[in-house]
Every structure is written in structure tokens, then in C-alpha cells.
């Protein structure tokens, strides 16, 4: 929590709960898009919208305040709300980020999509889900995704699609259900192998750095 | 100055703000003006002065040069142009 001076009053800024936090992140994305277009009027509108959403106050109350008060309040709000635990499922691949929006997508769908996942699993009300702590909500969503994947893998294993025929060995082989990128193991660096001293070359060693050196 | 006007101002002036800072405000404002003139972007000067003073560009051109520069420099000081530039650059990161 932080306290800031805004329009002659002291206002407390707390980290937003789940639903409001998602709204704030969507507004931040709108700010980034407006920055890319260099549309300063839109940037200012979205900063005011972000602040009014984060502080739960009317835009009219802040629209005419000095820019420095607004900018400071915005920076502090972003700092407080942006600092969440980054879970593996939040790391999108480049391809996912570049993908076009689904045709059934709409503004504000992210909240409904997450709320749907949590409500489906835990049968909580939307009001209850909206007030969850952000870190708790995302940890639950990741657990739901992991559990869904494990269930799908079990069903896949029982289906005939999981068995293929290997031409080389003339045997059947198990075909795994692909996992999302964030569930795949992180590749380890290759193990360093020590070469025994007696296997190393002896005498004057001339090192070639380029193909041209070798040719000469 | 409200945030919308402040961002309009810094968008106009950002390309003209010198990299080296100057303690003397009028000298710093002068360097910004020099950069504007060097690039032949005289309209930017009028637009920036209009944003900080609220005086219409048609009326600004009727005033004497020192008076217009006074509005310009005062506007930069009052609106902490360098802090504003820092905020604008932070947004663009």
C-alpha cells in the first residue's frame, strides 16, 4: 500500500484484486498501443482511465489536475500493481503473442475467460472470484491448467490415437499428447566431459582459427 | 498543466531537447529554440508556446520576440520540462 497526494487530498493505493487487476492490465496494453501510434491524446486518456480504475475515483476528478501529480500517481499505481509473481503459464511464446485474435474474442474477455476456468473448477461466484488476491488467482489457474492437461493425457493414453507404428523397428510405439511450451522441461546445458591428459595431443600445438588458415 | 496538454507539449519538444543539460533555464530554453530553428520547424515553437500559454498562434505572431520567448521559457520552467521528458521516455520504453 502507498499514499499519494492527489488534488489536495491524500489517497491510498492498494494492489487491485483479481478482476480490477485484469482491467488495469488491459488498460496498460491500450497505453502501450497508443504509445506505439504516438497518439498522445489517447495515451493521456488511458493514463487517466488507469488511474481512475486503480483508485476507484471518477475521471472528472483527475482530468484537470497538474500533470506531475497524475504522472506520479500513475507510476506508483503501476509499480504496486505490476509486481506479481510470474508463473510459468504466463510466459507466452513469440508465436502466441503474434497470433491474431480469435474471431469470438471481445474486449474484456480475459476476465471472463479466467473467471470461467475458476468458477468451473471451484464453483465460486463471480463476485468472490473478482475479489481474489492476484497471486492466488493465477496460482489456481495454473493448477487448473496442469490438472486439465494431465486428464487429457490420461484420456489420450486410452485412445487408439496414442499408438503409432514405427516403420524402422516394425513395432508399435506410444505417441505422446503434446504439452504446452510452459509445461515442457527446461533443457539442461550439455555435460562437460574431461579428456584424460594422455589423450591430448603432444608437441607444439598450432591453432587454426579460420578455414583460410587451414588452407594455407 | 493537465496531463493531456503536458504530453502534447513534450511530443512537440522531445526531438528538440538537447542532450546536455543547462542549469540556466533561459539558456536551456534558448538551446531548444536554436534546435527548432536549425531544423526549420518554426511551427513547433509556436505550437509549444500556444500549449504552455494558451495564446492563439495568430496572436502570438503579433507579439514581440522577447515576449513570446518569455512565455515559452516560463512554460518550460513551470512544467518541469526535464521531468516531463523523463516520464514521456519512461512511457515509450
Image: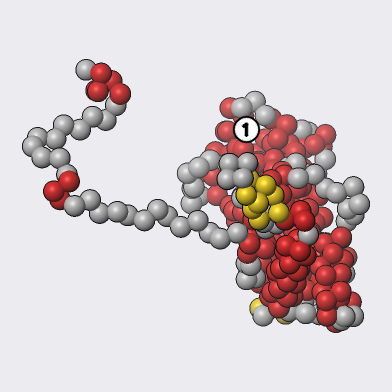
Is A80 in front, or is B55?
Answer: A80
Residue A15 locus on image (x, y percent): 71, 76
Q: Nearer the viewer, residue B64 or A90?
A: A90
Residue at the location (66% across, 56% down)?
A174
Q: Residue furthest front?
A: A170
A62 shown above or below B23: below
Determine the image quadrant of residue A123: bottom right
Lateral position of residue A135 relative to residue A215, left or right: right
Q: Secondary structure at mark 1?
A: helix
Q: Residue at x 65, y 51 (%)?
A: A172
Identify which residue is drawn at 67% across, 62% down. A90
Bin the neighbour count of mark 1 within 10 Å (Cα to Cα): few under 14, some 14-19, many 20 and up: some
Res A135 quadrant in image: bottom right
Which residue is identified by label 1? B36
Whether residue A132 appears in this view of the structure is: yes
Task: Looking at this view, name the residue that lies furthest to the left.
Answer: A203
Query: Where is residue A84 shown, x and y percent of the image?
Result: 65, 70
B77 to A87, vertically: above or below: above
Give the image location of residue A176, x and y in percent: 67, 56
Which quadrant is home to the N terminus of chain B? Answer: bottom right
Question: In the rendered image, is residue A53 in sight?
Answer: no
Residue closest to the far top: A216
Q: Who is closer to the viewer here, A4 or B68?
A: A4
> Between A70 and B20, which is closer to the camera in this rendering?
A70
Report x, y in % for residue A139. 69, 74
What chain does mark 1 sit on? B
Image quadrant where residue A50 sits: bottom right
Q: Is residue A16 left or right of residue B84?
A: right
Amino acid at each position: 500500500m502507498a499514499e499519494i497526494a492527489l488534488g489536495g487530498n491524500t489517497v491510498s493505493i492498494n494492489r487491485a484484486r483479481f478482476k480490477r487487476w485484469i482491467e488495469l492490465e488491459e488498460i496498460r496494453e491500450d497505453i502501450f498501443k497508443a504509445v506505439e501510434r504516438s497518439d498522445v491524446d489517447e495515451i493521456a486518456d488511458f493514463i487517466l482511465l488507469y488511474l481512475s480504475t486503480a483508485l476507484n475515483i471518477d475521471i472528472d476528478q483527475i482530468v484537470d489536475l497538474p500533470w506531475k501529480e497524475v504522472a506520479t500517481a500513475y507510476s506508483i499505481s503501476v509499480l504496486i500493481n505490476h509486481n506479481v509473481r510470474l508463473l510459468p503459464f504466463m510466459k507466452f511464446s513469440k508465436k502466441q503473442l503474434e497470433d491474431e485474435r480469435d474471431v469470438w474474442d471481445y474486449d474484456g474477455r480475459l476476465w471472463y475467460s479466467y473467471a470461467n476456468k475458476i468458477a468451473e473448477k471451484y464453483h465460486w461466484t463471480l463476485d468472490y472470484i473478482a475479489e481474489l488476491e492476484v497471486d492466488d488467482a493465477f496460482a489456481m489457474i495454473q493448477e487448473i491448467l496442469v490438472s486439465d492437461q494431465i486428464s487429457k493425457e490420461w484420456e489420450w493414453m486410452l485412445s487408439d490415437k496414442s499408438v503409432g507404428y514405427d516403420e524402422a523397428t516394425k513395432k508399435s510405439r506410444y505417441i505422446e499428447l503434446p504439452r504446452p511450451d510452459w509445461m515442457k522441461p527446461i533443457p539442461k546445458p550439455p555435460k562437460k566431459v574431461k579428456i584424460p591428459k594422455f589423450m591430448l595431443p603432444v608437441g607444439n600445438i598450432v591453432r587454426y582459427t579460420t578455414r583460410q588458415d587451414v588452407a594455407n | 498543466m493537465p496531463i493531456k496538454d503536458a504530453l502534447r507539449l513534450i511530443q512537440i519538444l522531445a526531438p528538440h531537447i538537447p542532450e546536455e543539460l543547462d542549469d540556466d533555464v533561459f539558456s536551456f530554453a534558448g538551446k531548444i529554440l536554436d534546435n527548432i530553428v536549425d531544423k526549420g520547424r518554426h511551427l513547433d515553437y509556436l505550437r509549444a508556446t500556444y500549449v504552455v500559454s494558451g495564446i492563439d498562434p495568430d496572436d502570438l505572431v503579433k507579439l514581440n520576440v522577447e515576449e513570446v520567448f518569455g512565455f515559452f521559457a516560463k512554460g518550460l520552467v513551470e512544467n518541469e520540462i526535464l521531468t516531463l521528458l523523463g516520464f514521456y521516455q519512461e512511457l515509450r520504453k
